[in-house]
Image: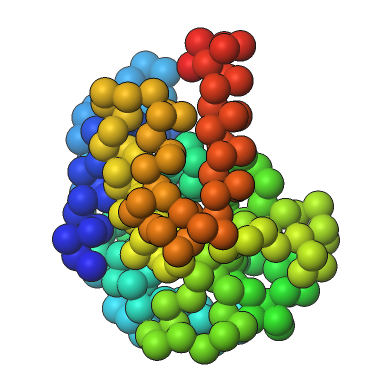
Amino acid sequence: MNDLARQFLDAYLSAFPSKTVYTESFPIEMKASEKSESGWIKWKPIRGTLSESDYYQIEKDFGVLFPKTFISWHQSYYFLDGDCSIIRLPASNPNRPLDDLKQAINWSCSRHFISSKIYPFADEGNDIGPLVFDGRMPMQDNEFPIRVYDHEYGGDLDGLSEIIFTSFSKLLECVIHYLTELKTRKNFEIIPDFFEIDREGAGRTGVDYWLSWVEIQKTCLDEFGQ
């Protein structure tokens, strides 16, 4: 998983500028530039120091379960942004450990479906709602499939999408591919590649969801040129 974590960061930094607004919580050890006049500063990822027990404590506090691959990925590095456009993954700031992950879990309706073994961990890129691990069927190492939850359903399980990724490792493979290919291809041209990378998730139950993203991206290009 360390390899996928590094590949994710390399792909992310090749696609998006590694800068953030400077605040008092900015970790000086991640500084990659001086603060600009407008208040922006560049950051660089650094090796993580969190232990698995830190994540187990969150599981206990919120009543959730995380896949082993997710914990391994998130603890491998500190990084200050995980917004990949189509998916917004929780970042990790050494000065505020696990704050983004806690925020992803603890939103207004989450208690209604955590008790049903639906565990939020990130955000969908079009503001529909959280990405969730579907833990209703036990899996080895908690490697649960991933769905999107529509926040307008207010906690009702009818708001769950079909499975869009079979596992967190498949999510990472697809996102890494997407970010890498952005250098040479239009975004809507890349997403159908997910159907081969994750044949049983994105390529079967998740097809309609991802084709809707293709249409959104084509519309944005036509209307806004991006």
Q: Is residue 28 visible?
A: no
Q: Is 110 above or below relative to 204?
A: below
Q: Nearer the viewer, residue 199 or 210?
A: 199
Q: Nearer the viewer, residue 177 or 77?
A: 177
Q: Quadrant of residue 161?
A: bottom right
Residue 69 percent location from the top left of the image: 33, 72
Residue 9 percent location from the top left of the image: 25, 47
- Disc count in the image? 0
Residue 35 percent location from the top left of the image: 31, 26
Residue drawn at point x = 21 percent, y = 51 percent: 7
Q: Is 157 above or below relative to 210?
A: below
Q: Quadrant of residue 10?
A: top left
Residue 66 falls left or right of residue 162: left
Residue drawn at point x = 65 percent, y = 42 percent: 127
Q: Is 110 above or below relative to 18?
A: below
Residue 19 percent location from the top left of the image: 34, 32
Residue drawn at point x = 43 percent, y = 39 percent: 191
Colour scheme shown: rainbow
Q: Is 149 above or below relative to 64?
A: above
Q: Quadrant of residue 131?
A: bottom right
Image quarter (top left, top right, bottom left or bottom right) of the N terminus: bottom left
